Amino acid sequence: MAGKTARFLVLDGYPKDHRGPLAANGGTLAGDLYARMLNECAPGCAVDIIFAADAECTLPSGTGLDEYHGICWTGSSLTIHDEADKRVTRQIEFAKAAYEAQVPMFGSCWAAQMAVTAAGGKCAKNPKGREFGLARKISLNDEGRAHPMFEGKKAVFDGFTSHEDEVAELPEGAVLLAGNDFSRVQAVDVTHKGGSFWAVQYHPEYDFNEVASLCRWRREALTKQGNFASLADADQFIGKMQALHETPDERHLRWQLGVDDDVLDTRIKQQEVRNWLAVKIYSRLDD
């Protein structure tokens, strides 16, 4: 890396009134999760976290963006297509500015929706409801199999997920890379105004503790939405997720939850992030 330290800006997309309940239920704040992942994938990097939904948060612009080698977007509990919500629109405006500044971007879930929306595409509520826990059989298309984001990744894999909105219309400059039966867009590469945004609808930064914590926080809503037959059913799911996080080698839990190394092996789970770093960040540091 030519002796330089990679510096990243992480935008935590959760509003203040949702960060508290997430933490209270055992979850890690989204920005901290991303910082941890970046430090695992790029040891020694510098990470600044900002809470982009907060009105008092000053979003960098112009030369301030030049201080960063990359920008990463976390998930969010907001609704990307709510045009009346200033917590949303201020983030969209920032994404537009980041495209123009041509600082490479990467992110999860909310990020895929942000990448598309800021470039002129559209998102909407998924008529199938909420995809929660695990996104099954994410499949790379021809473009995805040839794309550097998925170098070393299987053509079909599972990923952690939690979303009820999805990309509905891709903008000019977007390349669809992967999808599954629940959401047509599970990974996308958007080039806009000279800027680049690689984004996935799933969460490479999650683990089973984070999914259990999200479920603990939203168990009533998830049950009403049909993800669980009852609160007791939700609690059983939470228990198994938490147990597998604590004892990942338990074969009976792997079998009952239908999971494998796609989500249990950190290197496999975060391959997309390391590929982004190699292609978009390290190459710039070496220039």
Image (cartoon, helix red, strand yellow):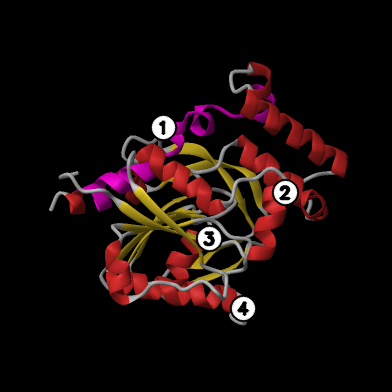
Q: CA distance from mark 3 to mark 1?
A: 22 Å
Against 189, residue 52 (above or below) is below
Along the polypeptide, which appears first: circle 2 or circle 3?
Answer: 2
Q: CA distance from mark 2 to mark 3?
A: 22 Å
Q: Amino acid at mark 3?
A: Trp
**Residue on which disc 3 sits:** 110
Taking the magenta stretch, the answer to whether it contains residue 262 is yes
Q: CA distance from mark 3 to mark 4?
A: 15 Å
Tag 2 and tag 1, C-beta contact below 8 Å: no
Tag 3 and tag 1, C-beta contact below 8 Å: no
Q: CA distance from mark 2 to mark 1?
A: 29 Å
Q: Amino acid at mark 2?
A: Ala
Image spot of residue 98 (x, y percent): 35, 70
Foreground of the two, 160 or 226: 160
Q: Give me the disc on residue 24.
A: 2
Task: Tell me the mark number nearer the camera, choosing from 2 and 1.
Answer: 2
**Residue on which disc 4 sits:** 85
**Image position of 158 (left or right of 48):** right
**Residue on which disc 1 sits:** 267
Mark 1 neighbour density, 10 Å: few (under 14) some (14–19) many (20 or more): some
**Image position of 218 (left or right of 247):** right
Image spot of residue 38 (x, y percent): 40, 45
The residue shown at (40%, 37%) is 40
Along the polypeptide, which appears first: circle 2 or circle 1?
Answer: 2
